[in-house]
Amino acid sequence: MRAICLRLQYEGTNFFGFQSQPGKRTIQGVLEETLSNLVSEEIAVYGSGRTDRGVHALGQMVHFHTKSPIPPAHFAYVLRRMLPDDLLVLESYEVPLTFHARKDACWKTYRYQIDSQRVPDLFQRRYHTHVPGLQLDLQAMKQAANFLLGEHDFTSFCSPKTTVLDRRRTLYQLLIQTHALGWQIEITGNGFLYNMVRIIVGTLIQIGKGERSAEQVPNILQARDRQAAGPTMPPEGLILMEVGYQPWMDEN
Amino acid sequence: MRAICLRLQYEGTNFFGFQSQPGKRTIQGVLEETLSNLVSEEIAVYGSGRTDRGVHALGQMVHFHTKSPIPPAHFAYVLRRMLPDDLLVLESYEVPLTFHARKDACWKTYRYQIDSQRVPDLFQRRYHTHVPGLQLDLQAMKQAANFLLGEHDFTSFCSPKTTVLDRRRTLYQLLIQTHALGWQIEITGNGFLYNMVRIIVGTLIQIGKGERSAEQVPNILQARDRQAAGPTMPPEGLILMEVGYQPWMDEN
């Protein structure tokens, strides 16, 4: 038995999210079916985390166990030929049998992309949320971001559907930048709750538009109440960019 | 009765080309149906030219006649709300009743995009043809391009299905450039025959790969035989970038 890790990309548009659901096209479902066919065993795929319906990934990580003698690096090559073109395996390699894509993840980076042009970019429309004419006060947003950095209970910034009990998470970096089509917000943390990135972005945008002040952020955190924070932004602008593991991983 | 001109963009992926066909989703078909509903008249839409199934446009021009009192600039605004998101009207304005989007076009620019990375860019895959590892001799291709510039009979560079009898066309500019993902070829001319850009690109790539020499181009032209030229490249890398009209058009 060996453990294989895959680094993969997907366009979320035509998937019902990462997690397997009966009768729905999901990333986990397509991967498990394709791998099971390839190695003629029942394969279970474990991701670094779920992504919601419509959310994209440029650096998702998954692992699985197999008895197959296929050389680890060949999985990427073979899977690129077998998988649909909105699901792309960048590389595959062997990891210790104790490795777990979710439990061993140290940090993740998400990017949220907004096209603020009057008329949206046709070729980028699937990867940006269109908010025409959006103007943002970067100073106020950076001040708000500083209140969010570090360890906090993010109950106010996750969906009420969240089942996890411990809502403390640590944010390491929060970058707000302009780009050719509008704005992008990159958030790195040790883990993210259900809808957390999309609610943080929705709240930062309210602050950037002057609808509420950066000084409210500590109160929002303290409230531990979803109603205290801003709206959940749509999924199409969200991309899982990278998942980080311990340095020893790089030596494998 | 007034004539209205639309400048529009589309992603060709999910269209059966520009021209109306019964039971098929086409750009002309969707535009005519949507406009007819909007103004409650039977509207006929005339394009600057057809684009094939799978070909994109960032600057297609069409015109139509209508009795509607809708202010010309409002058509773009209203149509953006009515049309599907792979068909985008950039602007609309009134033109003289004698204006014809195809007959009055003076020049057109097409771009052909190739992703030559080993693994294709996920978010750009619909707008690039993937030719992994493609290396090109730019000097040879520029030499070949020089043979193609100017007025020629392009019978060798069009589909045998072409019904037009006069196959003389004039190429004004032919640019071969590298870009972040690979290569792009931009061709400007007074008009293009059926599959002409895709066959020119296929022939230039053969020359860039050293499979044939630039000096053969005059013979290929002279042959007036489709068999003499290179292959027809796939449609997904092709984009109609711009259609040019007489300067007086800008004053309207």
Image (cartoon, coloured by chain):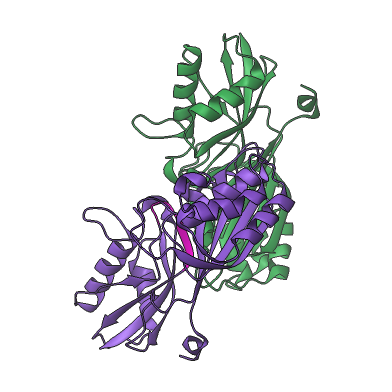
Chain colours: A green, B purple
At 49% across and 90% down in the image, what residue appears? B248
Give the image location of residue B130, x and y in percent: 57, 42
Image mark count: 0
Most foreground residue, A252 or A157 = A252
Q: Is residue B50 above or below residue A106?
A: below
The front one of B41 and A208 is B41
Q: Residue at x 36, y 56 (%)?
A: B162
The answer to whether B11 appears left or right of A134 in the picture is left
> Which region is colored magenta?
B52-59
Q: Nearer the viewer, residue B144 or B126?
A: B144
Pick out the residue farthest to the left.
B41
Q: Does B194 sit above or below residue B72? A: above
- Percent across and percent down for residue A72 are 65, 18
Quarter of the image where the C terminus of chain B is located: bottom left
Q: Position of residue A173 (x, y in %)?
A: 74, 50
Q: Quadrant of the N terminus of chain B?
A: bottom left
Residue B243 visible in image:
no
Looking at the image, residue A170 sits to the left or right of residue A164; the answer is right
Q: Is residue B84 left or right of residue A65?
A: left
**Residue A191, visible in the rendered structure:** yes
Q: Position of residue B113 (x, y in %)?
A: 58, 52
- Residue drawn at x 76%, y 25% as measured from the top left: A249
Q: Is residue B106 above or below residue B237?
A: below
Indicate yes or no whether the magenta region holds residue B57. Answer: yes
Q: Is residue A31 magenta?
A: no
